[in-house]
Image (spheres, rainbow, N blue to C red):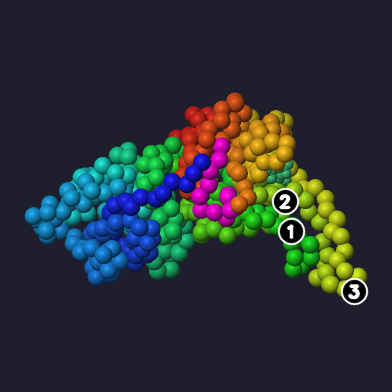
């Protein structure tokens, strides 16, 4: 599967009147640096927070807030019809209320009524405003109109408050925006009420207080799955080992572990309360038999051999727990396989054998080596199901691949679990 070339797309960034408007400058920058054509339309209130000159310099285009400027060009129609993606950030409670009602009282809301492309709202407000029934009703209305409304992050808000309502990291917004450009239908709100447990990253097995046995996993694929599942409405927990990716996905609970045995403990306990369990972590198969209390010295005798013992197979253990009724029978279990192929078979042959051996419902097979899979932004592979289906996952971002994996997962989750 070959890597497709990226095309230049037209992105309309609508900026609402909230303090988080300053963070949107990084989102604008991301899209211009990725080679896209960006037009910025702030609301008049947004200009109380960030000056027009900043948006003009970052986008390279003039900025206005009113339909009565450039009337000869019918700006709202030109901007709306010409866009491949609209990102509204920060989406304030007031802006979402006006958009949900189909109002057209400034250039941004008027433009929203003329768009046919994916629209991404990125809310940012105080927790009380986000949780208010009026805001939640507006969010539901916007989703019913086909828009994607991102789950806000939790953390420090303006003033001394903290809680849900923080604007997700600009990089998260950009990743979701790129996903909608790649595949406009990739984030249906179809996992509301579904509890998803994901392991991500690599495990580290200590040798002494300063050294460990580890692997190259960046955790990007596990985080990408978490990102996509959370934006589809799932309540997501990630048990993460060592990672080297972007920041934590918005709206996701992260539990940190180091070793395979710690991962096994967290996954087995938490799987009892999950509807979907995805083992995307790269688990060390072996660990040193003993861990030295003090740093191992070079000494004169040269290196001592390291004696290893086998770690638990967590994925296999989860399937056995389900077979034995320790976790619910309808739990969907997904594994990953990173394969290179060898003289005994190709990547897919090894994947098929692994699916049987592990007994999970779905297995995502990646080819590794030569810069593929570990640490990269993009990925490709196959999705094998226990029912015998084999689906090629075309080359694309790890978030795009995740949305395709979640389509299959959604098919397997009993309808009674989703909202
Ligand atoms: N896995 C696990 N526990 C382990 C090793 C792997 O749960 N001790 C999970 C991984 O998270 C992944 C799947 O099993 O979902 C396959 O991992 P992989 O390393 O490809 O397979 P192994 O079981 O290690 O098999 P082999 O080394 O023979 O390829």
Q: Secondary structure at mark 1?
A: strand
Side of 96 where 62 appears, left or right = left
Whether the residue under disc 2 has CB within 8 Å of ligand 1: yes
Image quadrant assignment for residue 33: bottom left
Q: Secondary structure at mark 2?
A: loop
Q: Secondary structure at mark 3?
A: loop
Q: Which residue is mark 1?
A: 213
Mark 2 and mark 1: span between their CA atoms?
8 Å
Q: Which residue is mark 2?
A: 284
Mark 3 and mark 2: span between their CA atoms?
30 Å
The answer to whether one can see residue 290 in this image is no
Choose between 345 and 218: the one closer to the eye: 345
Q: Earlier in the sequence, mark 3 or mark 2?
A: 2
x and y percentages locating residue 413 in the rendered image: 53, 32
Q: Is residue 267 above or below residue 289?
A: above
* Pointers 3 and 2 in contact (C-beta within 8 Å): no
Badge 3 density bin: few <14, some 14–19, many ≥20, Cα 10 Å: few
Q: Which residue is mark 3?
A: 300
Q: Earlier in the sequence, mark 1 or mark 3?
A: 1
Side of 6 where 145 appears, left or right = left
**Residue occupying image coordinates x 45% and y 64%:** 156
**Residue occupying image coordinates x 59% and y 33%:** 384
Is residue 380 covered in magenta?
Answer: yes
Is residue 240 covered in magenta?
Answer: no
Question: Which of the four quarters of the rendered structure image does ligand 1 lie in?
Answer: top right
For marks 1 and 3, give the one nearer the viewer: 3
x and y percentages locating residue 234 in the rendered image: 49, 42
x and y percentages locating residue 356 in the rendered image: 69, 31
Please give the range of residues in magenta.
371-382
Q: Earlier in the sequence, mark 2 or mark 1?
A: 1
x and y percentages locating residue 174 in the rendered image: 40, 55
């Amino acid at each position: 599967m070959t890597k497709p070339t990226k095309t230049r797309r037209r992105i309309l960034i609508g900026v609402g009147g909230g303090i988080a408007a300053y963070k949107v400058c990084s989102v604008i920058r991301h899209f211009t640096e990725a080679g896209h054509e960006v037009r910025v339309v702030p609301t008049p209130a947004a200009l109380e927070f960030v000056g027009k000159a900043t948006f003009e310099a970052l986008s390279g285009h003039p900025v206005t807030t009113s339909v009565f400027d450039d009337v000869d060009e019918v700006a709202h129609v030109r901007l709306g019809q010409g866009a491949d993606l609209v990102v509204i950030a920060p989406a304030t409670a007031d802006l979402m209320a006006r958009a949900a009602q189909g109002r057209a009282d400034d250039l941004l809301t008027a433009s929203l009524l003329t768009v046919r492309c994916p629209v991404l709202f990125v809310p940012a407000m105080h927790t009380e405003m986000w949780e208010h029934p009026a805001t939640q009703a507006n969010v539901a209305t916007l989703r019913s109109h086909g828009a994607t409304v991102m789950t806000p992050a939790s953390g420090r808000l303006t003033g001394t408050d903290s809680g849900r309502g923080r604007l997700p990291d600009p990089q998260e917004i950009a990743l979701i925006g790129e996903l909608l450009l790649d595949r406009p239908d990739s984030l249906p709100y179809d996992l509301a009420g579904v509890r998803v447990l994901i392991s991500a990253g690599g495990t580290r097995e200590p040798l002494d207080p300063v050294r460990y046995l580890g692997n190259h996993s960046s955790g990007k694929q596990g985080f990408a799955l978490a990102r996509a599942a959370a934006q589809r409405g799932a309540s997501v927990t990630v048990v993460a080992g060592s990672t080297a990716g972007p920041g934590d996905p918005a709206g996701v609970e992260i539990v940190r572990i180091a070793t395979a045995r710690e991962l096994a403990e967290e996954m087995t306990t938490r799987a009892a309360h999950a509807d979907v369990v995805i083992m995307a972590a790269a688990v060390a198969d072996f660990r040193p038999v003993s861990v030295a209390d003090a740093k191992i010295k070079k000494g004169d005798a040269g290196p001592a051999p390291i004696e290893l013992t086998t770690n638990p197979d967590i994925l296999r253990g989860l399937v056995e727990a389900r077979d034995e009724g320790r976790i619910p029978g309808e739990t969907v279990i997904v594994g990953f396989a990173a394969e290179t192929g060898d003289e005994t078979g190709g990547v897919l042959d090894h994947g098929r054998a692994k699916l049987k051996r592990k007994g999970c419902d779905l297995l995502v097979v990646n080819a590794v080596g030569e810069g593929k899979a570990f640490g990269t932004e993009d990925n490709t592979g196959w999705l094998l199901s226990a029912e015998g289906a084999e689906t090629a996952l075309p080359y694309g971002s790890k978030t795009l691949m995740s949305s395709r994996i979640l389509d299959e997962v959604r098919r397997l989750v009993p309808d009674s679990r989703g909202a």
